[in-house]
Structures are given as C-alpha cells and as structure tokens.
Image (spheres, rainbow, N blue to C red):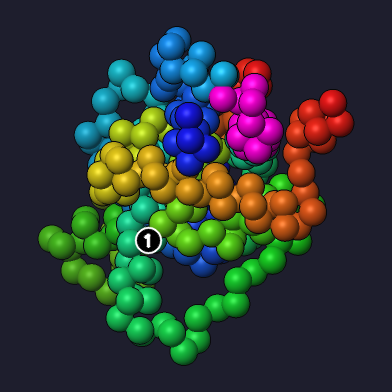
Amino acid sequence: MECSYCRGQVNRYLDGELGYVEVAELQAHLDLCVECAAELVELGALRSALAQWGTVEEVPAPDLVARVVAAVEAETAGRRSSTYERSPDGILATVDHLLGRVVLPGGREVPVRKIIGWGIAAAAVVIGIERRHGRRDRELKTS
Amino acid sequence: MAYSIAYKMLGDRQDAEDATQEAFMSCYRRLATFRSESLFSTWMFRLTVSAAADVRRREARRRAAGTVAANEPVRETRDSTDGGSLAAALAELPPDYRVPTVLRDVYGLAYQEIADVTGRPLGTVKVMVHRGRASLRLRLRSMGLVPHAYKKRGEV
C-alpha cells in the first residue's frame, strides 16, 4: 500500500467507512510504516479534541439576543402591518394589537411579541444544551 | 447556542452574529413548516448551519468581487485558552476546508448532509475534510503541539 493511498484510507477508517478486509490491509501497512501510524493516531486525537471543542460555548456580544429579537419583531411588523397604517410610533402598537396580550400569574399583562422573544432566547439555550449532549461521539480504535 | 455553531463554522464574530440573526429570522418565517416528528433543537441546528453556510457564500462572493479587500478585518485571535490552539489553527484554514471540517468533526454531520448544506458534491466535501484534517494536524505540529496519545506511542 502506497503511503499517499494510505492517508485516504486512514481518513475513511476514522469515518467508519472501511470494511473488514480494508481495515486488515490498512493495519498491515501501519505495522510497517511509522509515519502513517502517526497520522492515524494524531488525526484520531485531533478529532477527539475537535468534538470536545464543540461543547465549549462561545460568548456572544451582550446585546446580540436583543438585536435578534428586535430583528424578528421588525419582521413581524413588516408582515402584519400591511393592512394597517404604518407610523414610526404605531408599528409596535399594531403588532401588539394583532398578536394580543397575555396575562401572567400576578395579573401583569405582557404583549405576545415579548413572549415570542423570550421563547426564542429560551430556544437558543435549549439548543446549546441539546448539542452538548446530543452529539454522536465515536471513539476511535488506534491500532 | 446558535451563535456558537456559527462562530465555530465561520471563525468571525460579525459573520457569526449575522448568521445567528438569519437563523432566527428563518425560524420565524418557517415555523409553520416545522414538523413535530423531529426535535425542535435539531431543526434549529439545521437552520443555523444553513444560515452560516449562506453567510459564508455571500462573504466569498463579496471578497471575489473585491468590495471588502481594502478593509478586510485582521483575523482575530482568541482570548480564551479553552480550545485556543485549535481555534487558532482552524482560523488559518481556508473557509472551503474549515466549514466542512467543523461540520464533520466538531458537530458530527454525515458527509451527505454537509454536501447538501454547502451545495458541493459529496466527493469534493470528503476531499476538503481530509485536507482540512491534514492541514490542522500540520498547523498544530508547527505550534509545537503533538497529541498526547502520539507522544506515548512515540516513546515505545
């Protein structure tokens, strides 16, 4: 087996794409070739490190959530206000009128658009948790 | 979080913020098409990856047109030590290698899924991931970093 071909096979092995015979052929080459054996071990370690890195949360700018919510609100306003008179002060009121309000326990009224905003923020958190626990983690066998 | 996924794919805070915003706008627009048989988080993950891939394509077109060549931002260095060397090595990868490699090895997507989301042929995606891995390995080595497992093996 040529080393250049072996490097491709190493990647296919790491991706779980090799059959039994191909694995045996690869193993035979790795027993003789230190360089290719190192490639397998290092790429395997690299993949583990990358998977681990995927669980590290990046910290966004503090105002990102507010900006995203504002963008969605603007989208909401753009869609719903076509049959209503648009004015700079009236858009949010129009949105609230169309979407209605929700009475929270304690009697406080909150516009539905705010609930939607909170829902999106909560979804963002849930997704972070889901990705952390949901990734298929494949351990590699190194030799 | 959507921002983390986008940032790891794109390696640029501004691009990641744009992708996050687009992902949530897309979520809002397509909420009616969400089918409850799949997890909402899985659906949202797909929207985020797709939005980030769109941002990446748009940026590539802008750069090709030379519109941002004069004030292209300096690549940022990470202030965190967690994964800092990996992030630094990834930041030096061409985006064509970085995006599929992150989707494959950080988030575990199948090659076909990566091909679908990036709009590239399956074979091309595989080659890019293989090259991305090899390039990352060499860059980490040039930083003086060798995986622990290899050190142990080398001593034998």
Examine the rendered structure and indicate whether residue A69 appears above or below residue B12: above
Magenta range is A29-42
Question: Is residue A50 shown left or right of residue B43?
Answer: right
Residue A37 horizontal/vertical position (percent): 65, 30
Kindly identify the residue that appears in the image at 33 percent across and 57 percent down: B54
User: Which quarter of the image is occupied by the C terminus of chain A?
Assistant: top right
What residue occupies the far right of the structure in this picture?
B155
Magenta stretch: includes residue A31: yes
Amino acid type, mark 1? Val
Q: Nearer the viewer, residue A69 or A55?
A: A55
Q: Quadrant of residue B87?
A: bottom right
Residue A86 within the magenta-colored segment of the rendering: no
Measured as percent of width and height from the top left, residue B97 is found at 45, 53
- Residue ID for mark 1: B55
Q: Residue furthest left?
A: A83
Residue A68 point in image, percent of width and height: 46, 57
Q: In which chain is the residue bearing label 1?
A: B
Residue B16 at x, y percent in the picture: 50, 58
Residue plotted at (63% across, 47% down): B137
Residue extending farthest to the top is: A20
Rendered residue at 46%/89% (across/down)? B70
Residue at 48% x, 48% y: name it: B131
Judge whether residue A61 can be spotted in this image.
yes
